Amino acid sequence: MDRAFVDYYRCPANLVTFAHSGELTSGDCGYFCFGSNAIGYGRCSSNFPGEHSADMLHDALADVMVERGRVWLPFDPSEVVANLRYERYAAWNGDGKRLGTSSILRKAYYSVRPLLPVSVRKHLQRMHLRDWREIRFPNWPVDSNVECIFEQLMTLLLEAHAVDSVPFIWFWPDGLPSSAIMTHDVEALPGREACSRLMDLDDAWGIKSSFEIVPEGKYPVPEAFLKDIRHRGFEINVHDLDHDGRLFSNRELFLERATEINRYGRDYGAAGFRSAVLYRNVDWFEALDFAYDMSVPSVANLEAQGGGCCSITPFFIGKILELPVTTTQDYCLLHILNQSSIALWKRQIALITDQHGLASFIVHPDYVFEPRALDTYNALLAYLAGLRSEGKLWIARPREVNDWWRERSQMRLVRRGHAWEIEGPGKERARIAYASLEGNQLVYRVESPSLAVANTVNAA
């Protein structure tokens, strides 16, 4: 039950002393609170969990016992976190397919979508999403229930051990507070033809992004086009197979297409994947031969498939690292919400960076050069570049985030005399951090490189 917590913080495992305070039955999964800021989903031995997130939920924190250096919990943190990250709280039908992903209406829409003007598509999508504000869970515009659960658990550990601080390996390289990635889903021929201009625009702000390419059916993908993206230092990922919205409609079709998708991944030299329209079934991801995926939103109120992973930091789904989509897509901002300012994006960035997460953006070259969209995107790039110049953000390509998070997952803290040291490949960019309490507030302090060197010398 400690694994998810240790993987998140990369703290010494012997300091993580969680135990079950009661027997967890095989059934009775549901919602419960865990303090004032977190909602969990799963089995809870202390009370009957709620069937719906909008119910009056029992606060499992009231049933936690802290004694003899242990934290006695009425639930399994690793199980509850997995239930959120893998969207197991959402409704499923009997054969393992998420409800709504194979509806007749959706199939009909995608069969005629290429023929529909944008004005008609916007109207239909607004009709489909008309009740999005009434969705209570996950929390819009950013859901970080997973991170809130971990923070509450860290607070309890500090109390259990009666220590001033708990060391862990900081989330991002060089001690940077948070990270951001820019991604561009290329949906049709106009978008492919706009990629060069979009690279010029990103380069003007010193931001390298990734381009998600549809391999079949939408537009030709000449090697010269891919070579130009690579040559300019941008990244190529695979975007579905033919963007028809049917990839996850049934497992047999998915496995058939996954074989072709994997082949294109090898041909393109692509380390990452994103499905069309963010349709997904994470239980099938094992068939994808990629290092990372970018198909799971943190909160999916404005997406065709609802739900969300309730997380703003990367996490593993088997061998694949998930880089969750944590901000509103440009199309939704401009055409569903009908907003042209970056106020919503700034609010989402603030919520994400407050908890040291990953701000992940999707901006389409197919739409971005419309005058209103271009002004909005320029404003976003300027804002992100400003945060980077202030030392508040690591702006990286998705592959770089994947490489870092994988390296960090193999690092460990070891005690050398009176100091802690980090062991493992990539440790040169890693920083030791300390979690402590100021009053009732959990705070983090990142050790400076010079202090880390001094501690190492003193320990020797």
Image (cartoon, rainbow, N blue to C red):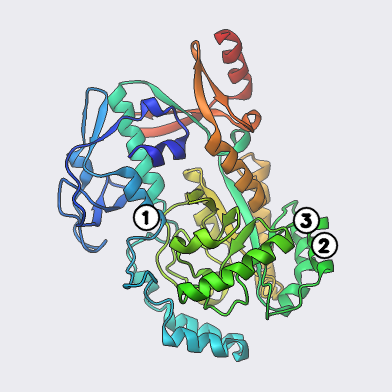
Mark-to-mark CA distance, 3 and 1:
36 Å
Q: What residue type is labelled 2?
A: Lys
**Which of the two discs, 3 and 1, labels the residue nearer the N terminus?**
1
Q: Position of residue 420 (x, y in %)?
A: 51, 19
Q: Which amino acid does label 3 sit on?
A: Asp
Task: Using the image, tell me which numbered label, if any, was put on residue 84.
Answer: 1
Q: Position of residue 140 (x, y in %)?
A: 41, 61
Q: Work out whether 57 lies above or below 442.
A: below
In the rendered structure, the answer to whether residue 437 lies left or right of residue 190 reads left
**Which of the two discs, 2 and 1, labels the residue nearer the N terminus?**
1
Mark-to-mark CA distance, 2 and 1:
39 Å
Quarter-wise, where is residue 119 in the image? bottom right
Nearer the observer: mark 3 or 1; the answer is 1
Q: Where is residue 259 in the image (x, y as percent from the top left)?
A: 60, 68
The residue that appears at 41% across and 57% down in the rendered structure is 86
Camera-side residue of 412 and 445: 412
Marks 2 and 1: CB-CB under 8 Å? Answer: no
Camera-side residue of 343 and 23: 23
In the rendered structure, the answer to whether residue 181 lies left or right of residue 92 reads right
- Quarter holding the N terminus is top left
**Which of the two discs, 3 and 2, labels the residue nearer the N terminus?**
3
Q: Can residue 332 be seen in this view?
A: no
Q: Can residue 231 be seen in this view?
A: yes
The residue beneath circle 3 is 203
Q: What element carries label 1?
A: helix
The residue that appears at 59% across and 60% down in the rendered structure is 361
The residue that appears at 45% across and 75% down in the rendered structure is 250
Q: What element carries label 2?
A: helix
The residue beneath circle 2 is 227
Q: Pointer 1: residues within 10 angstroms few (<14), some, or many (20+)?
A: many
